[in-house]
Image (cartoon, rainbow, N blue to C red):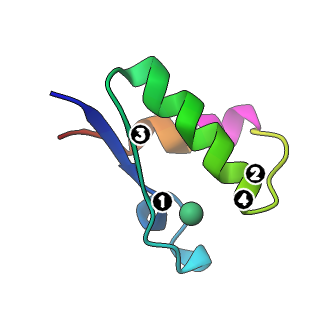
Amino acid sequence: MGKKIDCGKVNPASGCHHIVRGKTEEEVLKNAKAHAKEHGMLEVTPELMKKIKAHIEDE
Ligand SMILES: [Zn+2]
């Protein structure tokens, strides 16, 4: 079972419906960081990281 993060849940204001996926928590976080860059967030702050982690779901 993999992990996923719904971008629209982390940041509803973005209007983004991208689902970030990964096999492990580590991988999904790595992919989420890469996706954050597409939103112009070049730096993932500890605060944002907390928010992202709170939205990791099992798939
Ligand atoms: Zn997004």
Give the vertical position of 4 relative to 13 (above or below).
above
For marks 2 and 4, give the CA distance.
Answer: 4 Å
**Horizontally, is 29 left or right of 19 in the view?**
right
Across and down, in percent, residue 52 comes to: 51, 42
Q: Residues within 10 Å of mark 4 (few under 14, many from 20)?
A: few
Where is 18 relative to 27, above or below? below
Disc 4 residue: CB within 8 Å of ligand 1: yes
Q: Which mark is residue 54?
A: 3
Q: Are marks 2 and 4 in contact (CB under 8 Å)?
A: yes
Q: Residue at x 49, y 57 (%)?
A: 10
Helix, strand or loop at disc 4? helix
| Distance Cα–Cα, label 3 vs label 1 | 12 Å
Disc 4 residue type (three-letter): Glu
The residue that mark 4 highlights is 38
Magenta segment includes 13: no
Residue identified by numbered label 1: 7
> Mark 2 — residue?
37
Spatial CA span between label 4 and label 3? 20 Å
